[in-house]
Image (spheres, rainbow, N blue to C red):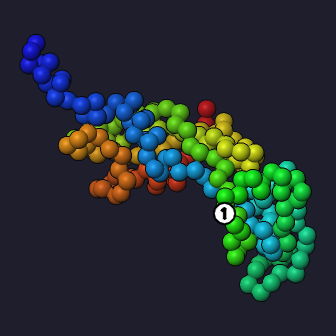
Amino acid sequence: MFVVALCLLGCSPRDFLTRRLAADLISASDAFKAPQLFWLRSGVVSNKDYSSPDSMVLQRRGWIIGTEQKCPEGVEPPPCWDIVLSPLGVDTIRPLISKALSDEGLIGIQVARRELVEISGISKAGNFADVEFIWRWVSLNPVGAALYDSGVRYQSTVAFRRYDDGWRVVDQNVRSAQPLDDALRIARPVTP
């Protein structure tokens, strides 16, 4: 009994990859905590950009207005549109802008953050493990609420590796392991 107690005292909570530890490590990682940026383009854009799904959402909300313009050289397909914020768009979007307008007419807006829903499985092989998890977008503002449905769940798999101080999320390619930022980028929606 005394030997078992000493062994348990010598182990840290990070020595055992549990669902709780995996959830804590994923949630605390820089890649997972990074907010989703939406790049709003103003000025003259192609018809393809103006009719994109994100642009259509902003148009339906009345946040942007486009007037048909002649396409400048190198911008295709016609027709082109001069995009400006509507008065409602100025009221909604201006408080969200953290940086000045770039030379290309791009406005970066933080619109959503990831929220871990659950760890759905752990597969271990020695000092390596794959952790499958479900996550969703949580909007940070009205633009995020318009662009991201918080009811949509995504499934990702990330690699973990055990070191002398415990388990860590892999943040670079190791063997066939997948780093977290890659796992988040290729996440697929989960159907209920």
Q: Which residue is mark 1?
A: 99
Q: Looking at this view, name the residue that lies furthest to the top.
A: 1
- Between 105 and 82, the one nearer to me in the picture: 105
Image coordinates of residue 69 in percent, x first then y, are 89, 77
Q: How many marks?
A: 1
Based on the displayed image, in which of its 4 quarters is residue 153 positioned? top right
User: Residue at 85% across / 72% down in the picture?
Assistant: 82
Q: Is residue 53 visible?
A: no
Above or below, 172 against 20 in this view is below
Above or below, 16 against 158 in this view is above
User: Residue at 23% across / 45% down in the picture?
Assistant: 163
Q: Looking at this view, name the residue that lies furthest to the left.
A: 3
Q: Is residue 37 visible?
A: yes
Q: Residues within 10 Å of mark 1 (few under 14, many from 20)?
A: few
Above or below, 183 against 55 in this view is above
Q: Looking at this view, name the residue that lies furthest to the bottom.
A: 73
Image coordinates of residue 189 in percent, x first then y, are 59, 43
- Between 2 and 99, the one nearer to me in the picture: 99
Is 175 positioned to the left or the right of 38 in the image? Answer: left
What type is the residue that disc 1 sits on?
Lys
Based on the displayed image, in which of its 4 quarters is residue 93 positioned? bottom right
SS type, badge 1: loop
Is 59 positioned to the left or the right of 157 in the image? Answer: right
User: Residue at 84% across / 75% down in the picture?
Assistant: 80
Looking at the rendering, in which quadrant would you find the N terminus? top left
Based on the displayed image, in which of its 4 quarters is residue 137 positioned? top right
User: Residue at 80% across / 51% down in the picture?
Assistant: 92
Image coordinates of residue 71 in percent, x first then y, are 83, 81
Is 147 positioned to the left or the right of 31 in the image? Answer: right
Looking at the rendering, in which quadrant would you find the C terminus? top right
Image coordinates of residue 173 in percent, x first then y, are 34, 58
